[in-house]
Image (tube, rainbow, N blue to C red):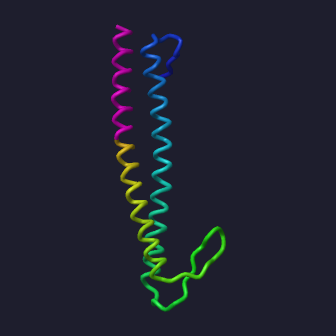
């Protein structure tokens, strides 16, 4: 269903524009969540691999495209810390996604109700 904004009153116009903005926000949050999930999986794989190797083996970490020698335990702690940070950010994004979904649904129902009342 296509809505011509010029045919709507100011209040309904604002609601439709707000709904469009919320949809854009939801798309942004979803993309952000996908990126965070990918980074979390990457950290988990790195942690698993670091835990498999002997403490005295040489390990390297990438810094700006350069591999730098590092200590296994130090690198392991860095990756665990990163994973914790990413998981906290994911929880925050999840709560924002849920809140935005609720706002979108509420606004959608309000717009539908207003349109039905206007048509009646």
Q: In this view, does 31 lie to the left or right of 105?
A: right
Residue 23 in the image, given as x and y percentages of width and height:
47, 34
Q: Report the residue at 33% width, 28% height from top.
A: 106
Q: What stretch is highlighted in magenta?
A: 99-120
Residue 10 in the image, given as x and y percentages of width and height:
46, 12
Residue 116 in the image, given as x and y percentages of width and height:
35, 14
Q: Main secondary structure of the magenta part?
A: helix
Q: Report the residue at 48% width, 29% height from top.
A: 20
Q: Which of 86 and 21 is in front in this view?
A: 86
Q: Report the residue at 45% width, 77% height from top.
A: 76
Q: Report the residue at 39% width, 64% height from top.
A: 84
Q: Does the magenta stretch include residue 53?
A: no
Above or below residue 64? Residue 104 is: above
The image quadrant where one finds the C terminus is top left
Above or below residue 30? Residue 75 is: below
> In the picture, residue 61 is in which quadrant?
bottom right
């Amino acid at each position: 269903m296509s809505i011509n904004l010029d045919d709507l009153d100011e209040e309904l116009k604002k609601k439709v524009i707000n709904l469009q903005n919320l949809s854009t926000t939801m798309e942004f949050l979803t993309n952000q969540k996908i990126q965070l999930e990918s980074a979390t999986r990457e950290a988990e794989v790195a942690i698993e691999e670091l835990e498999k190797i002997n403490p005295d083996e040489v390990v390297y970490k990438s810094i700006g495209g350069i591999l730098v020698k590092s200590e296994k335990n130090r690198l392991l702690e860095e990756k665990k810390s990163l994973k914790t940070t990413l998981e906290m950010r994911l929880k925050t994004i999840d709560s924002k996604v849920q809140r935005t979904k609720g706002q979108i649904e509420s606004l959608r129902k309000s717009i539908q109700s207003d349109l039905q009342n206007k048509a009646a």
